[in-house]
């Protein structure tokens, strides 16, 4: 596996992590003690992952959420023309502070995610030994819009890495 394909996969993993982090910003009323209730079940979507050389790659994803109170377990499968990604994610929300871990089995990667949620927007940092980046997530019109940028640790700059829309 090349470094570029690892970064593409981790960009996609980061993008999907963003789906989990959106629940505190959902506009509809939520059950007391269960902020992730609206994510229960299956979601589908399409998007683009941008490789290190700037080439866009279309992806299709299916994800399922199991929810218990402020804890969520996400299983996700995404496929593009030349790769796939398979992740498990565990996230906890404590008063708008988000913290969790993830594991990706195809590329053998794991890491952490931390962030905050306010209103309809989430800002998060994603880290592991193979990828670092930021994401912004906006909830609107019954769907999720997610944008990811990847950190170039040599220059300290960010480049677009992924964008996706998900729906039920």
Image: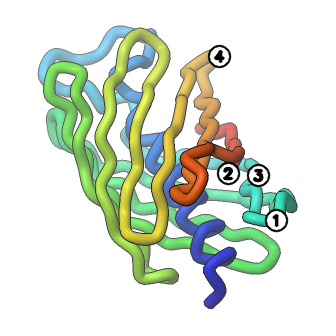
Q: Picture quarter containing residue 43?
A: top right
Residue 107: x and y in percent read: 50, 81
Q: Residue at x 59, y 30 (%)?
A: 144
Q: Which residue, given by chain and number where applicable, does mark 4 sit on?
A: 141
- Cα separation, mark 4 vs mark 1, equals 33 Å
Q: Left or right: where does residue 77 sit relative to residue 141?
A: left
Q: Earlier along the polypeptide chain: callout 4 or callout 1?
A: 1
Q: Residue furthest bottom?
A: 1
| Location of residue 14 in the rendering, given as x and y in whole percent from the top left corner | 50, 53
Q: Position of residue 105 (x, y in %)?
A: 42, 80
Tell me what residue is drawn at x 55 percent, y 47 percent. Answer: 156
Q: Residue furthest right?
A: 55
Rendered image coloring scheme? rainbow
- Report if the CB atoms under discs 4 and 2 are less than 8 Å apart: no
Instruction: Say few, some or many: other residues with alpha carbon within 10 Å of mark 2 (under 14 / 14 to 19 / 20 or more).
Output: many
Front residue (pair 60, 97) = 97
Q: Are marks 4 and 3 in contact (CB under 8 Å)?
A: no
Which residue bears the numbered disc 1? 53
Residue 94 at least partly seen: yes
Q: Number of labelled discs?
A: 4
Which of labels 3 and 2 is toward the front? 2
Q: CA distance from mark 3 to mark 1?
A: 14 Å
């Amino acid at each position: 596996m090349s470094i570029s394909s690892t970064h593409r996969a981790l960009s996609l993993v980061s993008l999907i992590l963003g789906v989990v982090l959106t629940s505190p910003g959902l506009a509809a009323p939520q059950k007391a003690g269960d902020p992730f209730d609206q994510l229960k079940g299956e979601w589908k979507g399409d998007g683009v992952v941008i490789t290190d050389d700037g080439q866009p790659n279309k992806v299709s994803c299916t994800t399922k959420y199991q929810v218990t109170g402020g804890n969520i377990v996400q299983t996700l499968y995404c496929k593009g023309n030349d790769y796939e990604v398979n992740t498990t994610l565990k996230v906890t929300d404590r008063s708008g502070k988000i913290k969790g871990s993830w594991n990706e089995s195809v590329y053998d990667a794991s890491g952490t995610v931390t962030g905050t949620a306010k209103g309809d927007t989430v800002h998060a940092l994603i880290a592991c030994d193979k990828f670092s980046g930021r994401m912004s997530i906006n909830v609107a019109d019954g769907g999720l819009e997610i944008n990811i940028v990847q950190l170039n640790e040599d220059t300290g700059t960010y480049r677009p890495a992924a964008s996706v829309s998900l729906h039920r």
